[in-house]
Image (tube, grey):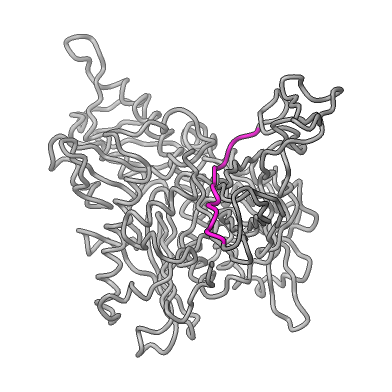
Amino acid sequence: MVAPFPDKDFPIVIGIDFGKPSVHAAGPKSKRADFLITAPYSGTTFSGASYAFMNDNEITDIKIRPGQPDYSYPKCPTICLYNRDDNKLIQWGRSAKAGKSKYPNITILQQFKLYLDDNLEGVVRQLPLDLTATDIISDYLEKFFAYVKVDMTKKGFHQNFEKQARFCLTVPAMWSDKSKQIMRDAAIQSGIINASDHRDRLMLISEPEAAALYCERTCDKFNMQHGDEFMICDAGGGTVDLIVFRVEMDAAGNRKFRESTKGLGKSCGSTFIDRNFRKHLRKKLKKVIRRSPNGAIEIPDAPLDHMMDIFVDNLKPLFDGTDDLYSDISMGFDLVTKTEPSIGLDEGNMTFTKQELKKHVFDPVISEVVQLCRDLQKDTTNLKAIFMVGGFGSSAYLYSQMEKEFSPENIRIVQPDRPEMAVARGAVIFGMHPSKIATRIPRFWYGIEITNIFDPSVDPIEYKVVRPDGSVRCDNRFSTYVERGKPLDIDSCVSRNYTTYYPSHTACTFFASDSDTEPRYTISTPTTSVRKVFDFEIPMPTLPNVKHGDPVPLTIKMYFGEVELRVEAVIDDQTYAVVCNFNA
């Protein structure tokens, strides 16, 4: 029997941003054990945390600065440093970045949330050291949350407060169901939650949904009315996620959000600007670095990495498209006295003109973000504003290009306060008020495999099955549970009744398709792509007074309005949680 989540036993909710956890606590400030909600948000390049009290709308950010307490930025890089000899994590965050030169035989891993993007092909797919995505993420989460616990204890939270904690973890909207399950598995492996815990002890919310909850605070500022639409552009280090909500006011004047279009997402975040800059910098340096005895131009990694750090930490945030940027050349290049006007080098200082930065570094990525917003705008009917959130969302140059594109259509471009913390803070708010998200739009068709009446004019002959009773059926048919693009309330449950036979277990495979039209088969065709999402098995419980071979009514319930798919089975009036195998 599946019991409801015992909220009263878990007065603390902790959200984790893999890019930024947030913590939110409820109750009077003098009673730190009261209902706390922490919202960690798992970003691709930086991680952070915030907390607030339930009866206090103020949200305070936790400064995640392992090994560098004086560093001013409140978030730390999502980076892991591993020992190649034993595959053990040595350092994490900025300490890992600083420790690259201190340890021999090490591997640096960063941007590893991109490994869970099924849409990204090629360069970032292969993991080193026989590590899995679950291993790396869980290692980072373990260290990250240990830091959060120490920090919160210093602020007055009691020892072992995390045992009373409920967690809210944010994920990109574009992620597959399997990727979401990997994040859940990583949270369990890290020790943040236990495998035996109630499933709802760890809540998931998409990053743009969390950002929307944070941006709601500005709706009054812009006079957002019932029926108005606004877009969230959550631009982070690796991914850019878009989602559109329609404002809905109830009779009491309470505001809720209904997702009004199918969201979009793409891996075109600011790390791709970093890659462009690195490529452009190497090209410039090759013109002045002496060739080695074998004739090759070898650019040493250490000084190149140092210049990349200067770009990421200092130059990139300043660029607004109106001024050139300047950087000292690293001593390791032995170019401090050299001058080469063709690349902007003047006695150890290099100039990057605004024209070259736009053309070679920023515009190739910025144009993808603008086009992504334009593509989603086509599905809207009353778009009033676009909120820019995430670390990349705070870019002055991105803001100016979005303004240039959309302002002529009277669509406001808004950068809320602390846009880099919007997702983490929104996850805190979701932990307190999960019902504020009223509907979601499914990104896929979902269904199971059945046999159906064979149609010789349509169905392939190899799918034809003749049953012992003489009926002719078509195998591999797709039985739709959820229609792609059709709004679902967050508590939507699709229930189907079947008959099984005692004492057999029931095995089933669940499929998904992002095709524009409803799939006919569970096997892909030239025009329709179908993939397996997971297998699940429903064990037959011991039933008194039921004999071998007796028919047993079975109801399968699937919940689709939540961020994660959830399956339950009802046998003999008892409800059972169903374990889904995403690795099948």
**Which quadrant of the structure image shows residue 248?**
bottom right
Residue lying at 30% horizontally and 80% vertically, measured from the top left = 157
Where is residue 488 drawn, in percent x and y? 71, 58
Q: In the rendered view, does 555 fall on the left or right side of 188?
A: right
Residue lying at 53% horizontally and 48% vertically, measured from the top left = 397
* Name of the residue lying farthest toward the top: 294
Residue lying at 37% horizontally and 63% vertically, measured from the top left = 193
Q: Is residue 575 above or below residue 443?
A: below
Where is residue 120 drawn, in percent x and y? 51, 34
Q: Is residue 125 above or below residue 252?
A: above
* Viewer-proximal residue among 234 and 467: 467
Where is residue 457 drawn, in percent x and y? 87, 23
Q: Quadrant of the N terminus?
A: bottom right
Q: Which residues are magenta?
A: 530-543
**Which quadrant of the structure image shows residue 4?**
bottom right
Q: Is residue 3 above or below residue 29?
A: above
Magenta-colored stretch includes residue 23: no
Label tally: 0
**Which quadrant of the structure image shows residue 345?**
top left
Q: In the rendered view, does 291 fall on the left or right side of 494?
A: left
Where is residue 66 drawn, in percent x and y? 23, 59
* Viewer-proximal residue among 137 and 539: 539
